[in-house]
Image (cartoon, helix red, strand yellow):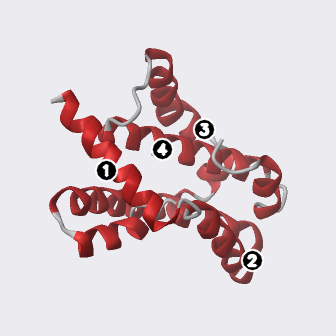
Amino acid sequence: MYFDQIQLLRWMKNDKSAVEYVELVCDIAHKWDDLIDKDKLLDDNSINKLFFDILIRLPRNSFYRKNFDHLNSVLMNAISNWQIATQMEREGGGYETSIAFILRSSYVDLITQAALLCGGNQWACTVGAEARAITHSETYEGYLKNLALEKKARSSQN
């Protein structure tokens, strides 16, 4: 889990289905990132769980089903932004990397939008600020350090 359960329940106004949705999409996003960055090897059980979550659990989540049109569009945008960020990290220089630092965490918009659906726009802004602060606690310097380690791991696998 990437966020504290109590925090998620508060953010989602105690909607357990919304919490499960956030946990699912965050876990899926992080594992997808691990597969692409090749900085963490996923064992067979983890890969099987990932695909089960994508194909079975996420489509059956009642919060996602109820709000599919809204959330699926946000999800498509988060995926595009993450792919753009990955490309910018790999092909760009310092300027592109600074953009990628924020862009790659667009999955946080899924949390903000889930909070909007649970508690309205003002609540979404409160939750969004808190979620971004947690997500970027790594700092830009930490991000650059981890990015260098990922590049090294990818080059050693080739």
Tag of residue 30: 4
As drawn, 18 above or below 39: below
Left or right: 2 in relation to 118: left
In the picture as drawn, the residue positioned furthest to the top comes out as 44
Residue 148 numbered mark, or none: 1
Q: Note whether residue 75 is visible.
A: no
The amino acid type, in three-letter code, at marker 3 is Arg
Q: Earlier in the sequence, mark 2 or mark 1?
A: 2
SS at mark 3?
A: helix
Q: CA distance from mark 2 to mark 1?
A: 36 Å
Q: Nearer the viewer, mark 1 or mark 3?
A: 1
Q: Tell whether 99 sits left or right of 50.
A: left
**Crowding at label 4, few (<14), some or many (≥20) Cα neighbours within 10 Å?**
few
SS at circle 1: helix
Q: Which label's residue is closer to the chain start, 3 or 4?
A: 4
Q: Earlier in the sequence, mark 2 or mark 4?
A: 4
Q: Amino acid at mark 1?
A: Ala
Residue where numbered disc 2 is placed: 123
The residue depicted at 73 percent of the width and 47 percent of the height is 17
Dots 2, 1 in contact, CB < 8 A:
no
Q: To which residue does mark 3 refer?
A: 60
Relative to 50, 24 lies left or right: right
Q: Position of residue 49 (x, y in %)?
A: 52, 24
Secondary structure of residue under mark 4: helix
Mark earlier in primary sequence (1, 4): 4
Q: Is residue 91 left or right of residue 26?
A: left
* Viewer-side residue, 63 vs 29: 29
